Amino acid sequence: MADAFDGNFAKWPVRHSTVDPATLAFSVTPDDGKDLPSSSAMPSYASSFFVGGAGDVRVTALQDKTGSLATSVLLKNIQNGQHVPLAVRRIWSTNTTASAIAAFTD
Protein backbone atom coordinates (compact mmCIF):
# COMPACT_ATOMS: atom_id res chain seq x y z
CA MET A 1 0.00 0.00 0.00
CA ALA A 2 1.36 3.42 -0.96
CA ASP A 3 2.05 6.00 1.72
CA ALA A 4 -0.32 8.96 1.20
CA PHE A 5 2.25 11.36 2.68
CA ASP A 6 5.20 10.11 0.61
CA GLY A 7 6.63 12.98 -1.43
CA ASN A 8 3.97 15.45 -0.27
CA PHE A 9 5.65 17.01 2.75
CA ALA A 10 6.64 20.19 0.89
CA LYS A 11 3.04 20.67 -0.29
CA TRP A 12 1.36 20.39 3.11
CA PRO A 13 2.40 23.06 5.64
CA VAL A 14 1.01 21.13 8.58
CA ARG A 15 2.48 18.91 11.24
CA HIS A 16 2.46 15.27 10.27
CA SER A 17 3.12 14.07 13.79
CA THR A 18 2.63 15.43 17.29
CA VAL A 19 6.39 15.25 17.78
CA ASP A 20 7.32 17.33 14.71
CA PRO A 21 8.89 20.63 15.76
CA ALA A 22 7.37 24.03 15.00
CA THR A 23 8.82 25.75 11.95
CA LEU A 24 8.27 29.41 12.92
CA ALA A 25 9.01 31.27 16.16
CA PHE A 26 8.36 34.90 17.05
CA SER A 27 8.44 37.16 20.10
CA VAL A 28 5.07 38.21 21.49
CA THR A 29 4.12 41.58 22.88
CA PRO A 30 0.82 41.01 24.71
CA ASP A 31 -1.93 43.18 23.19
CA ASP A 32 -5.62 43.56 24.08
CA GLY A 33 -6.50 45.04 20.69
CA LYS A 34 -5.28 42.51 18.16
CA ASP A 35 -4.57 38.86 17.51
CA LEU A 36 -1.08 37.49 16.96
CA PRO A 37 0.71 38.74 13.82
CA SER A 38 -0.46 37.61 10.43
CA SER A 39 1.48 37.74 7.18
CA SER A 40 2.30 35.45 4.31
CA ALA A 41 5.09 34.00 6.47
CA MET A 42 3.09 33.67 9.71
CA PRO A 43 -0.48 32.63 10.42
CA SER A 44 -2.52 34.60 12.96
CA TYR A 45 -2.23 31.98 15.68
CA ALA A 46 0.41 30.07 17.57
CA SER A 47 0.33 26.30 18.03
CA SER A 48 2.08 26.76 21.41
CA PHE A 49 4.00 29.35 23.39
CA PHE A 50 6.90 29.67 25.80
CA VAL A 51 7.17 31.84 28.92
CA GLY A 52 10.65 33.04 29.86
CA GLY A 53 9.63 35.00 32.96
CA ALA A 54 7.11 33.51 35.40
CA GLY A 55 3.62 34.93 35.83
CA ASP A 56 0.05 34.77 34.59
CA VAL A 57 -0.92 34.76 30.90
CA ARG A 58 -4.35 35.68 29.58
CA VAL A 59 -4.97 34.02 26.21
CA THR A 60 -7.70 33.44 23.69
CA ALA A 61 -7.54 29.86 22.45
CA LEU A 62 -7.81 29.15 18.74
CA GLN A 63 -11.34 27.75 19.13
CA ASP A 64 -13.65 26.17 21.66
CA LYS A 65 -14.91 22.58 21.61
CA THR A 66 -17.75 23.48 19.20
CA GLY A 67 -15.33 24.96 16.68
CA SER A 68 -16.45 28.52 17.39
CA LEU A 69 -14.06 31.29 18.32
CA ALA A 70 -13.04 30.84 21.95
CA THR A 71 -13.26 33.32 24.82
CA SER A 72 -10.24 34.35 26.86
CA VAL A 73 -8.91 32.45 29.85
CA LEU A 74 -6.31 33.38 32.47
CA LEU A 75 -3.57 30.78 32.89
CA LYS A 76 -2.20 31.26 36.41
CA ASN A 77 1.35 30.75 37.68
CA ILE A 78 3.13 29.80 34.47
CA GLN A 79 6.72 29.05 35.51
CA ASN A 80 10.04 30.31 34.11
CA GLY A 81 10.95 28.36 31.00
CA GLN A 82 7.56 26.67 30.68
CA HIS A 83 6.26 25.59 27.27
CA VAL A 84 2.45 25.74 26.98
CA PRO A 85 1.09 23.39 24.27
CA LEU A 86 -2.11 25.38 23.60
CA ALA A 87 -3.05 26.90 20.24
CA VAL A 88 -3.84 30.58 20.81
CA ARG A 89 -5.04 33.51 18.69
CA ARG A 90 -4.27 36.28 21.19
CA ILE A 91 -2.12 36.91 24.23
CA TRP A 92 -3.69 39.76 26.18
CA SER A 93 -1.83 42.52 28.00
CA THR A 94 -4.58 42.83 30.63
CA ASN A 95 -3.83 40.41 33.49
CA THR A 96 -0.66 39.09 31.79
CA THR A 97 2.24 39.38 34.22
CA ALA A 98 4.59 36.85 32.59
CA SER A 99 7.43 38.15 30.43
CA ALA A 100 9.70 37.05 27.60
CA ILE A 101 6.91 35.27 25.73
CA ALA A 102 7.66 33.54 22.44
CA ALA A 103 5.14 31.82 20.17
CA PHE A 104 5.63 28.82 17.90
CA THR A 105 3.72 27.66 14.85
CA ASP A 106 3.99 25.86 11.54
Image (spheres, rainbow, N blue to C red):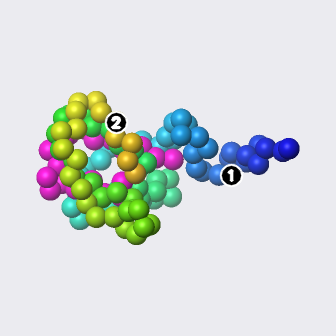
Q: Which residues are magenta?
A: 88-106
Quick one: SS at disc 1? loop
Spot occupied by residue 12 in the image (x, y as percentages of width and height): 65, 52
Pointer 1 or 2: first along the chain: 1
Mark yes or no: residue 26 visible: no
Spot occupied by residue 92 in the image (x, y as percentages of width and height): 22, 56
Residue 71, quarter of the rendered image: bottom left
Task: Please give the count of numbered marks on the rendered protein.
Answer: 2
Mark yes or no: residue 93 visible: yes
Residue identified by numbered label 1: 11
Picture disc at residue 23: none
Q: Amino acid at mark 2?
A: His
Residue identified by numbered label 2: 83
Question: Residue, x 41% and y 62% (percent of image)?
Answer: 65
Q: Is residue 77 found left or right of 105 in the rendered image? A: left
**42 up-or-down from 9: above or below:** below
Spot occupied by residue 64 in the image (x, y as percentages of width and height): 38, 62
> What is the CA distance from the residue labelled 1 to the residue labelled 2?
28 Å
